[in-house]
Image (cartoon, rainbow, N blue to C red):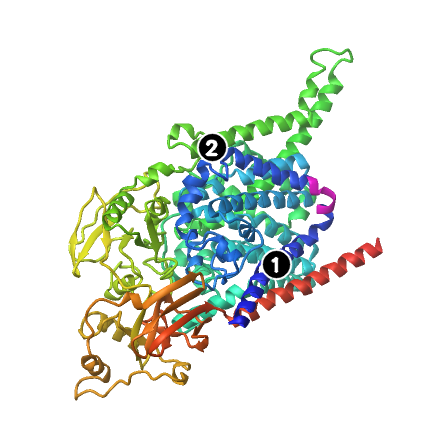
Amino acid sequence: MMIASVLDRLFLGIMVVVPWVLLACALAPFRERIRREWPFFLLIGALTWGLMLILFSPLTETFQQAVIHITTKPWFELYRVSILRAHHAPLWLSNLSLGLPALAHPYTAYFSPLTSVLLLFRDMDIGVNILLLVHLSFAAATLALVLRELGIARVAVLIGCVALVWNPWVFRRLSPEVHAIYVFGFAWIPLAWGLLLRFLRTMRFTDALAAGIPLAFMAISMPTVFAQMTLVVVWFLVAACAGALLRRQWNMVGRICAGGALIVASVFLTAAPEHLAASEFFAQQSGGSRFGLGRIYGWRDRDLTAREFLRTLLPNDLGRMFVSRQGPVAHFGVPFSPGDAVVVLALLGAVIALKRRTLRHAVRPGAHLVLVVFLANVATHGIAYGPLHRLHPLWAPSGNWPVLGVLMLFSCALFSAIGTAWVIRMAHQARRFVASRLPSPPTTVSRMPALLTTATICMLLGAEMLWGVTGIIRGIRSDDPNVQPTLRFSIPTQTFENMRRLPHIAYLASRMRDYGDVGRVFCIGDHGRWPSPCFDDAIAHAGLEVVGVPELAWGMPGSVAVPFARVWSEWSGTFSVFARTLLELAHATHVVTTRRLDLPLEKEILWEPMPGNSEISGNFLAHAVNGGAWKEEWDRIVRIHTLPSAAPYAFFADPVLLDGSEADAERVVTELLGGSIPAFHPRKIALVYPSAKTSRIANFAFPPIPAGPEGVSARNAFFTAYPRREGPVERSKIVAQSTHPGAWNIAGTAPRDGVIVLSQLFYPGFRAWINNNSAPVLRADLMFSAIPVSKGPFSLRVQYAPLHLLLAGVLPLAFAVVFGVRLWREAFASGSRQ
């Protein structure tokens, strides 16, 4: 246990420190620019921070209550940062990107450098708000860095940064939907673009390695944005290769291909711990492993699969021949920044970029793909969207809108900055022209050229931007469409008080007051959506405890998670017998769902919790369970699944070894829970899976499976002959002394040899000790964890201590050291030559 604790702390240190070292390596190619102009970049970040403070106060204000507070607190409250600061690893908050599935299991144990800032805050509400400000400020500062590298004037850079930060693409992600997470992916776009463009300009392999680092952090923070940014990188590399082939520069083609391979290697080395852990988890749950089919590169396991790439690369009609359509049409048009002036400036800058040789050389031919998509989107938005969306996969009805976000955010900022620089230059030329034509005596007319100075132009552009910002603020704080003149997206809002009065929350709170106890609410999400009924903080405020996501993992209908895929009908919404047993084992008292479930006496009642928000379904169901029979219980227009009193979180059970294949075990479990063998009680008998460890368990003998009569299988004969132990579960015998993420201390008395079952998903990497002696952690009941114990009193400690993750952490550590030394030697050699 002492060694495991030391390794745990070492792993925590690696996961927090190494990303910052890698970030420094990613910024190293711009070190000269940063050294000369760091006050300007710091000013850009500070201005962004200040503009955000106009919108909300991170300590108390409405933005926290209406957005972050509502969408994340029920989950983050379960895993306080104070637990991490007390070194109770693993890092369950993982990437802290607000990707809620990341909270489901301990394998998401890797920080991006910015998200590790959250460790400094004990109050999660304040910490998440500060995290939002940090990401937006970092995005603006790195965008300013990239634009300055392209030779754009500071004033134009300032306008371009405003176009990025105040873009409704960002603000739509910050609506009361869960899509606030996209800010944490978009924050890495400017640095990734800058390093990619630098590599295409210099063709240096160190720049290629650096370009993979922000891509890896993007994968950790927001996998969907990473998947689409990877597609952009592929487009750029292919365009650069095509240009080199046309010029017959074979050496250049080889360097581009080698650079692309180095980018991929850099991504893997940076995110190796999370990827290896996710791959092992996927292999453990499904018997196979494939790159991208784990937690790392997708909160849905299709983000980096060949299926997603085919669906993205192929035109819509051709793509449907190979893959099925997923998701509705998700086209959000041009990302209109505050006022249409930024779009006009961007179009102007795009034209200038095609004309100016220096800019063409700076952004390379591949960058013009952005211009083509940008102009095509402008042309088709609201005009020819219907007939033309089939001509390009960006308009395919397959949910590829993150492509638009990745392309539009940077292109709008880049080209608006170029356009602004051109406007300022033309203003100076106009001023000189007017001054040359004016008479020499000082008159009122002669003073007019002073109105065309750089400061005046900046003030006018800044006033236009602030006008747009004001419109966005009013739009976010009001549902009245008349006060959203510059906002093209409807951002439905609900104040904190309104969220408390949601009917299903009021119903649950009233039921809990009747029970006189804290209720445990299990949320089931709709297909392709999030379990919206449990996003609001009203559940925690009403004294209800959200379970399921942290305790039973992410795997409800539509979430495409592996553990529940076999026992819960993913697309039909079937409420299987085994799924109900899982709810009982988790001690859930209520189930809130956004989807129709196939239950007796079930009726579908529509209720829209947030009018105007098409991404949140409003089908809340309410039922009560009395003695196993379902009957309807009405309150207003809401129906909620209410479960009877359930078993404790940790309980004693008699083990039975399952033999046969995985499919056979699944079938047997379903039959047993379906009641074909009435002697089976899921809270008293644990079906333990065979493994290499179970055959070598010392000092413990599993009950044998006797042979049955002719025509009766051995397993059925065992359950028929097994003595039934009726009556309530003896909860007093098992006491959870302390429970932390990844560490449990449990004490009790075992009436006989058996197993202690934890309603916690079974993962490879958990270790257990019984009375300070090592004990195996087995897989029971398809997905739970079970630890064998002997008769008598026991003290059990279960801790997540994966040695393979520690070894995987050596990869980014070694990469950071080797790459950092290489960059230091280059910088030292350059300084010596100078």
Residue 217: x percent and y percent? 56, 56
Q: Secondary structure at mark 1?
A: helix
Magenta stretch, residue numbers = 34-39
Sequence-earlier tag: 2 or 1: 1
Disc nearest the viewer among 2 and 1: 1
Q: Residue at x 67, y 27 (%)?
A: 455
Would you say residue 249 is visible in this rendering?
no
Q: Residues within 10 Å of mark 2 (few under 14, many from 20)?
A: some
Residue 692: x percent and y percent? 41, 82
Q: Is residue 716 above or below residue 730?
A: below
Of residues 83 and 175, the one nearer the viewer is 83
Q: CA distance from mark 2 to mark 1?
A: 37 Å
Specify the principal SS of the magenta part: helix
Name the residue type under label 1: Val
Which residue in the protein does label 2 denote? 473
Residue 501: x percent and y percent? 30, 39
Q: Is residue 100 above or below residue 498?
A: below
Of residues 658 and 263, the one nearer the viewer is 658
Name the residue type under label 2: Ile
Q: Residue at x 23, y 65 (%)?
A: 577
Give the number of marks: 2
Would you say residue 716 is visible in this rendering?
yes
Can residue 826 be found in the magenta stretch? no
User: Which label number is shown at residue 17?
Assistant: 1
